[in-house]
Amino acid sequence: MTPDLIHEFVPGSSNRTLLLLHGTGGNERDLIPLGRELDPNATLLSPRGKVLENGMPRFFRRLAEGVFDLEDLQKRTHELADFVAAAADRYDIDNKNIIAVGYSNGANIAASILLLRPEIFDGAILFRAMVPLEPHKPPELANIRVWIGAGNHDPIILPSETQRLVELLRTAGADVTVRFLSAGHALTPADISLARDWLSGL
Ligand code: MLT
């Protein structure tokens, strides 16, 4: 299998890999500086979402803001999980040390991988995530650590939606840290510094 998404690969000096997943309208280059800030030594793997919404790359189709095309979401979730597995082979990445770092649409597909393909990640940093789907069978997330950064004034994701995601992941056994920041949907320096501290303690 060959990794079939357009992507950036930046080798690192440790055996940790950050899988960087951009938001709607982003691309594979957007989150490289964020990845470096979060961990200066990690390998960075950053794919571009294949779905276009008015020319803007995304990781899966949506019918309206916050209303997802669930069939496409499931298909893209498996496609991205297979991409990560193929890239791990091709680049000789330690597949037991992959942490997803997603923002907005990228955080939502990372959460979807946690729920449908829990073997892919060892942890995840989810900036501004919502519940992407309700899995038919609860995943086994006992060894997975997740950090979630939410904005108290986010017009797209209400705190109750973040809480729903936290409960879903915790019920599946994940060790979840959630931080509600005085912020909107955009990332803030506080998000980055809190996530960096969490990551450095793993
Ligand atoms: C999504 O579509 O994944 C969410 O609404 C976040 C966004 O991309 O705006």
Image: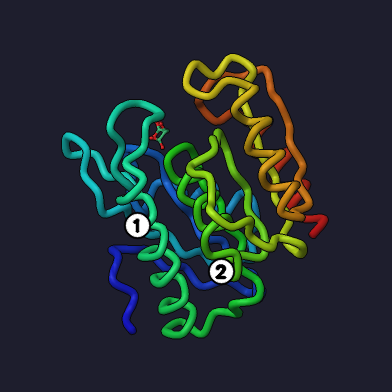
Binning the other alpha carbons within 10 Å of mark 2 as few (below 14), some (14 to 19) or many (20 upward) gives many
Q: Is residue 59 visible?
A: no
Residue at left offset 32%, top offset 41%: 69
Question: Which residue carries the number 1 mark?
Answer: 76
Q: Check disc 2 and report the residue beneath it.
A: 120
Query: Looking at the figure, which quarter contains the N terminus?
Result: bottom left
Secondary structure at badge 1 equals helix
Q: Is residue 92 something one can see in this rendering?
A: yes
Mark closest to the chain's N terminus, 2 or 1 = 1
**On the rendered structure, is 37 left or right of 141?**
left
Q: Whole-percent x and y of residue 163?
A: 68, 30
Label 2 SS: loop
Q: Nearer the viewer, residue 176 or 14?
A: 176
For this view, does 66 lie left or right of residue 141? left
Q: What percent of the width, then of the height, locates residue 43?
A: 55, 68
Residue at point 69% right, 63% down?
140
